[in-house]
């Protein structure tokens, strides 16, 4: 399943973030009901003010309806837009890659890559995150539509890795050692469970909706040789939990 957001109040939220700086990658699947508004799909923000935040956005309020990777530092933005836009009522894989203070990229369905190389420091004071709205002191730009499979890595994924995700690969199989959070968002649990890092999200209003398909790994894919610190059974425990939630 996915969560359906009403465009005015619905969101998922946590008062911490799973990363503290660059590089980072954010990806999700989005299916939107409005092509004239902006939808903040995933955002990190400073809840003490409104001038420092980072986000993956569907920009229905911009000509061409691109997907945008952006962050704002002291009220001054840097951003990259895809070369093609999203369509109403369509599942799109969208991804923002923030490689450094001088490099950011964005994709829709594994392609239409947009880039920006403006130099800008990472925003300070970020202390919370949200799915479905711009998270800051005065939240805004609520998503109208469905969001699922939100994943965050503490590295910059490559073009090929983003394309694999867009083709249906699970985030659990793409640079797994650098995957710091993954919320399938199946709508069965409140809070929504992060099956990787434990950054569960509080649910506010968003309801369960039909789930887009992706390929899920079997336990053997995620097994690693046993070590003194981490026995081989550790990772399959997460896979079994994933299966028990009804998405394998």
Image: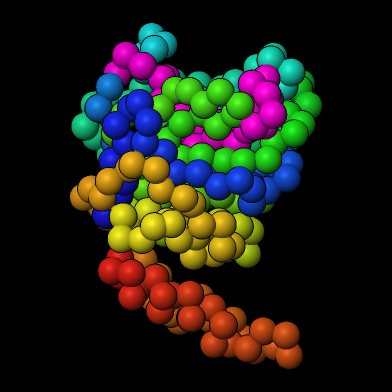
Q: Answer whether residue 30 is magenta in the image.
A: no
Inspect this view and state whether residue 103 appears: no
The N terminus lies in which quarter of the figure? bottom left
The magenta stretch spans which residues? 35-59
Residue 58 colored in magenta in the image? yes
Q: Quadrant of residue 197?
A: bottom right
Residue at 67% across / 84% down in the picture? 230
Q: Residue at x 61, y 26 (%)?
A: 137
What is the x, y in percent for residue 231? 63, 88
Q: Main secondary structure of the magenta part?
A: strand
Estimate the x, y position of residue 87 in percent, counting from the top left: 27, 26
Q: Residue furthest top?
A: 63
Report the front residue among 55 and 117. Answer: 55
Residue 184, quarter of the rendered image? bottom left
Quarter of the image for residue 220 reads bottom left
Q: Is residue 83 left or right of residue 138?
A: left
Which residue lies at the image location 54% right of the left edge and 78% below the top edge?
Answer: 235
The C terminus: image quadrant: bottom left
Residue 28: percent from left, percent from top: 43, 44
Residue 53 versus residue 105: which sits nearer the camera?
53
């Amino acid at each position: 399943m996915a969560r359906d957001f009403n465009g005015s109040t619905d969101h998922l939220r946590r008062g911490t973030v799973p990363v503290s700086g660059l590089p980072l990658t954010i990806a999700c699947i989005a299916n939107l009901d409005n092509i004239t508004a902006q939808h903040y799909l995933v955002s990190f923000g400073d809840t003490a003010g409104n001038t420092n935040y980072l986000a993956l956005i569907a920009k229905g309020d911009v000509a061409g309806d691109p997907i945008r990777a952006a962050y704002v530092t002291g009220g001054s933005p840097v951003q990259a837009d895809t070369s093609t836009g999203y369509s109403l009522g369509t599942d799109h894989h969208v991804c923002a890659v923030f490689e450094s203070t001088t490099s950011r990229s964005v994709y829709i369905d594994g392609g239409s890559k947009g880039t920006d190389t403006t130099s800008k420091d990472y925003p300070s004071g970020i202390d919370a995150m949200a799915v479905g709205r711009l998270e800051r002191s005065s939240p805004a730009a609520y998503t109208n539509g469905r969001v699922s499979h939100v994943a965050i890595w503490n590295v910059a994924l490559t073009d090929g890795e983003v394309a694999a995700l867009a083709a249906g690969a699970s985030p659990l199989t793409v640079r797994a050692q650098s995957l710091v959070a993954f919320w399938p968002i199946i709508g069965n649990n409140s809070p929504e469970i992060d099956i990787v890092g434990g950054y569960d999200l509080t649910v506010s209003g968003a309801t369960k909706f039909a789930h887009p398909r992706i390929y899920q790994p079997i336990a053997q894919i995620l097994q690693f040789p046993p070590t003194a610190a981490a026995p081989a059974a550790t990772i399959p425990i997460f896979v079994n939990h994933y299966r028990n939630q009804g998405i394998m």
